[in-house]
């Protein structure tokens, strides 16, 4: 059995670690709430863009816009597929990064020529260690996502899609389903699917007036769709940011609970060692007194 000093040192060390995990839990909780508030503030604009696209498609059902072109003439093995992978800059977030990278690896096994667009230090390090070519690295932190960063990503993928260098664009991110569960998701950004807009239901009591698209429906779509894609990417960045901190909160909570269990077990060992030391001292005193008594006799 370890002596009392060694056990006390271990208890103090675990307590110091628990202070760090509790602090990280509090910080992640605050950042997650701020991120969710930002997403809630921007969602009305995003849904308005989505609604306007659906509205144009209802009024001009025969529109043949380039962002809806599925390029069916290109064989699956010849398609150029761009995938935006959103990872974290730091670890200690449970399986957050592992799940995203696992889904991205599965995506790379699909037929076609793949182009990776990586956000987050851990994603860059992962693919660099596996010697997988990255088409574009966005060298800024994924912490505190902004609309400006989302526009940079949107501009990159739209330019390559318009130039024919990409036939499909996907984004892999983590969606926070509930306060206790986050799941990696794969969303197709381009080309757009008409069914994604035809399923939108309008309230029965809302009157939709006739619209005049100037100078043309294609021109209006050229203006709306980039903003819509930008809103989708920004939403994915914020969801990933929120999910990262939610995962880190759960990981830190589990670490704190484990620390409490370790401290409890070590406290029992400490009390046993202390009791054994007291018993040993009492025994030594009794033996010494007995020896002195026999000596006087």
Image (cartoon, rainbow, N blue to C red):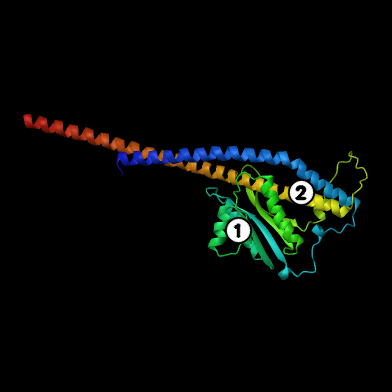
Q: Which mark is residue 31?
A: none
- SS for dot 2: helix
**Mark 1 vs mark 2: in front:** 2
Q: Quadrant of the C terminus?
A: top left
Asked where in the image residue 33 lies, by quadrant, the reply is: top right
Q: Is residue 297 left or right of residue 46?
A: left
Q: Identify the residue at horizontal 69%, vertical 49% (top origin).
A: 150
**In the depicted structure, whether residue 209 falls above or below residue 119:** above
**Measured Cα–Cα span from mark 1 to mark 2:** 30 Å
Q: Position of residue 187 (x, y in %)?
A: 71, 54
Disc 2 crowd rating (10 Å Cα; few below 14, some 14-19, many 20+) is some
Disc 1 crowd rating (10 Å Cα; few below 14, some 14-19, many 20+) is few
User: 39 or 159: which is nearer to us?
Assistant: 159
Q: Position of residue 162 (x, y in %)?
A: 76, 60
- Earlier along the polypeptide chain: callout 1 or callout 2? 1
- Can residue 263 be seen in this snapshot? yes
Q: Position of residue 260 (x, y in %)?
A: 45, 39
Farthest-out residue, front: 215
Q: Identify the residue at horizontal 58%, vertical 46% (top origin).
A: 247
- Can residue 297 be seen in this snapshot? no
- SS for dot 1: helix
Q: Which mark is residue 102?
A: 1
Q: Which residue is mark 2?
A: 227
Asked where in the image residue 128 lies, by quadrant, the reply is: bottom right
């Amino acid at each position: 059995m370890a002596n009392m000093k060694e056990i006390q040192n271990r208890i103090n060390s675990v307590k110091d670690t628990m202070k760090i995990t509790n602090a990280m839990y509090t910080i992640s909780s605050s950042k997650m709430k701020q991120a969710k508030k930002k997403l809630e503030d921007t969602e009305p604009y995003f849904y308005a863009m989505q609604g306007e696209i659906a509205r144009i498609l209802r009024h001009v059902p025969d529109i043949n816009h380039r962002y809806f072109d599925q390029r069916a003439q290109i064989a699956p093995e010849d398609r150029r597929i761009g995938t935006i992978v959103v990872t974290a800059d730091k670890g200690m977030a449970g399986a957050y990064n592992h799940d995203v990278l696992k889904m991205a690896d599965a995506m790379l096994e699909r037929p076609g020529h793949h182009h990776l667009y990586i956000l987050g230090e851990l994603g860059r390090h992962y693919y660099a260690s596996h010697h997988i070519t990255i088409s574009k690295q966005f060298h800024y932190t994924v912490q505190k996502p902004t609309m400006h960063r989302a526009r940079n990503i949107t501009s990159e993928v739209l330019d390559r899609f318009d130039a024919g260098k990409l036939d499909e664009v996907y984004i892999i991110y983590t969606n926070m389903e509930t306060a206790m569960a986050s799941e990696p998701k794969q969303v197709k950004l381009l080309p757009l699917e008409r069914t994604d807009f035809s399923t939108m239901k309008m309230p029965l009591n809302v009157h939709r007036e006739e619209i005049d698209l100037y100078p043309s429906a294609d021109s209006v779509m050229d203006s709306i769709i980039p903003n819509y894609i930008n809103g989708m990417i920004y939403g994915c960045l914020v969801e990933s940011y929120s999910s990262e901190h939610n995962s880190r909160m759960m990981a830190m909570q589990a670490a704190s609970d484990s620390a409490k269990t370790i401290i409890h077990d070590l406290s029992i060992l400490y009390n046993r060692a202390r009791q054994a030391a007291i018993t040993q001292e009492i025994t030594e005193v009794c033996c010494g007194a007995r020896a002195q008594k026999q000596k006087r006799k």
